[in-house]
Amino acid sequence: MPIRRPIAVAAAALILAAPVSAQIPVVAVQAEEAAPTAAGTPEPDLDALLWIARPLVVFADTNADPRFGQQMQMIETGKAELEDRRVIVLVDTDPAANGPLRRHLRPRGFGLVLIDTDGAVVQRRPAPTSVRELSGMIDRLPSRREETGSRRP
């Protein structure tokens, strides 16, 4: 059974009602149906995050995968940059559950999927990716340029 490793667990209601929190929410997604979090509210899904946040989905076949640990460490050290870009991290380390994220995104082993606020998959990576690279990808998105008022392509 995979271990839930939240930095801070955010519920969909909190995401909808408040601006981006002081910490990047990490949600462990393990079951087909939304399982209650420690606060007793369902975990957010991709539809709940549409136009609100950029989901960064981290998949691994087990939480013991060294690539998973490396990726989570990079996310933890770069959380300020991700927070500024309205990123919410979703983690799925249980392929046997075959939850909605796995069915929708179809990962193979370790994988990282960045999704824009409009629900479009921006990038898929089969290896750990630095927050600097992720931030660069996000900053080049039209939605991010609109948020910041940047006219640079």
Image (tube, rainbow, N blue to C red):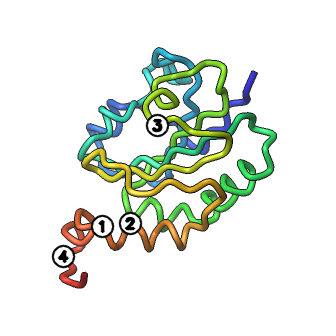
Q: Residue at x 61, y 63 (%)?
A: 129
Q: Are marks 3 and 1 in contact (CB under 8 Å)?
A: no
Amino acid type of the residue tagged 2 in the rendering: Ile
Q: Residue at x 62, y 53 (%)?
A: 126
Q: Are marks 4 and 2 in contact (CB under 8 Å)?
A: no
Q: Residues within 10 Å of mark 2 (few under 14, many from 20)?
A: many
**Mark 3 to mark 2 CA distance (whole Å):** 19 Å
Is the residue 51 above or below the residue 81 in the image?
above
Q: Are marks 3 and 2 in contact (CB under 8 Å)?
A: no
Location of residue 36 in the rendering, given as x and y in whole percent from the top left corner = 50, 18
- Give the foreground label among 4 and 1: 1
Residue nearer the viewer, 30 or 12? 30
Tell me which numbered mark, 4 or 2, is placed earlier along the sequence.
2
Could you say which quadrant of the image residue 28 lies in?
A: top right
Q: Are marks 1 and 2 in contact (CB under 8 Å)?
A: yes
Check disc 4 and report its element: helix, strand or loop: loop
Amino acid type of the residue tagged 4 in the rendering: Gly
Residue 105: mark: 3
**Mark 1 to mark 2 CA distance (whole Å):** 5 Å
**Mark 4 to mark 2 CA distance (whole Å):** 14 Å
Location of residue 19 in the rendering, given as x and y in whole percent from the top left corner = 30, 50
Amino acid type of the residue tagged 3 in the rendering: Leu
| Residue carrying label 1 | 141
Q: Give the quadrant of the N terminus.
A: top right
Location of residue 68 in the rendering, given as x and y in whole percent from the top left corner = 71, 48
Q: Residue at x 46, y 19 (%)?
A: 34
Tell me which numbered mark, 4 or 3, is placed earlier along the sequence.
3
